Image (cartoon, helix red, strand yellow):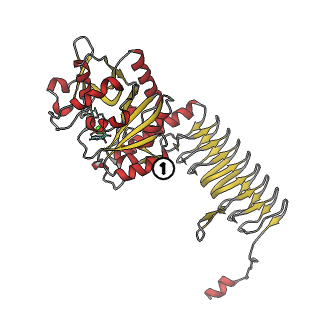
Amino acid sequence: MLKSIILAAGKGTRMKSETPKVLHEIFNKSLLGYVIEAVNNTGLADENFVIVGHQAERVEEYIKNNYQNARTVLQSPQLGTGHAASMALPYLKDFDGEVVILCGDTPLITSETIKEFVENHRAQKSDITVMSAVFDNPANYGRIIRKTDGKVDCIVEEKDATPEQKAVKEINAGIYCVNWAKVKQAFSQLKTNNAQGEYYLTDIIKWGNENGLAVDAYILKDNEEIFGINSKLNLAEAAKMLNRKIVNKHLANGVTIIDPDTTWISPETKIEADTIIYPSTYIEGENVIGKNCKIGPFAHLRGGVVIEDDVKIGNFVEVKKTTIKSHTNACHLTYLGDSEVGSGVNIGAGTITANYNPLTKEKSKTVIKDNVKIGSNSVIVAPVEIGEGANVGALSCITKPVAEWALALTRAPLKIVEGWVKRQTK
Ligand code: UD1
Ligand code: CA
């Protein structure tokens, strides 16, 4: 089985945040989480070593609570990427398989690419494979320096590069696959005689060549996958890139998305063909949306939402942990949380399921059976059930179960005082 080492000890100064860089999130998942899951989803890896340093306790806590097959290893002080990777040595003393080394701040890397990268490493019978990419503007990246026969010779960091080397457009993506037993000796031989005075992981390439190992590069197909996060701007850009890929996938599957630029759809959301998503809709968490639905404009699905076919969720409607059966409409200004809504239901404008008791901090469930009609501006106080076919009059506050086919109504009597306005203004 394969193992991974994920470098995540760096400071991330430019994030200007009290949160460690790799714990920043896109769609409620940390940058580090994306990388770990990309490795896990290859199905090739059984263990991930996350190298932590800056704000180590918070990252350790996060890993412990979220990823069972990942463990953290402390790097203190942080003396460079080569030093960081070597922190895993004590845990991999007798390990004889491949290790993939990645960075915790490149969340867009996909499991498909990692898998292909490892398969390429195996097919080429390589001992060290580095992932490279060709950039029009290679500034700040390490450059892949090839020999005249095209084989990879070494990696030179921008700060150490000659003008000729700086002109090279093939860069080091910062992802490596190594045959651990052969490469582990390299770590004790790395030097710090470079512009940054650090132990460079990139020096294992030169070392491999000098020690008769098979060294190779794999050229990445989609450069966006190694987009690194160094600032809040980068974080926003990466989220856009990820979202655009998700939106494009849904478009390809037959979902109509009126405005891809203002529509946000989480990676865990499934949508069937011929559903229409209107502009400025935000869908986060895990959701399933059937076919021929209309969602938005300005809808917010917050996860745990299961919507059957032919459902309308209109403007300013928020839905959380709720199942909605077919042919049900909630078209305007509504909150549905922790609810089960039947089919053929009409939820009037301004309906609220009051699911949260702020005193006990408990959430309760609302059940609305098939064909129920809820009048506008009603509050349904959970836990409560509204029976099949029942009607709720506008402006009602429902605090007791409503029997099937009943009318439920809470309403102060309407008083009309003739001529009242004129008398006030005489
Ligand atoms: C590194 C590569 C460069 C490559 C680029 C791709 C080296 C020397 N250079 O440069 O060739 O083009 O990545 O993005 O490796 N880290 C630690 N401990 C340390 C230092 C770094 O864990 O002591 C982690 C950082 O948190 C980060 C990753 O390693 O996740 C990369 O470090 P960074 O300083 O960003 O390297 P670059 O200068 O970008
Ligand atoms: Ca970097």
**Front residue of this view, candidates 298 and 153:** 153
Label 1 belongs to which residue? 65
Instruction: State ligand 1's quadrant.
Output: top left
Compared to residue 203, the image places residue 28 above or below, namely below
Is 89 left or right of 253, judged from the image as shown?
A: left
**Front residue of this view, candidates 198 and 419:** 198
What residue is at 48 percent from the left and 49 percent from the top?
Answer: 65
Q: Amino acid at mark 1?
A: Asn
Percent from the top left, x then y, of residue 314?
A: 63, 51
**Front residue of this view, candidates 423 and 295:** 295
> Splitting the image into 4 quarters, where does residue 249 fall?
top right
Farthest right residue in view: 405
Percent from the top left, x then y, of residue 135?
A: 30, 27
What residue is at 67 percent from the left and 65 percent from the top?
Answer: 377
Is residue 138 at all visible to an observer of this figure? no
Percent from the top left, x then y, of residue 92?
A: 37, 33
Farthest top residue in view: 149
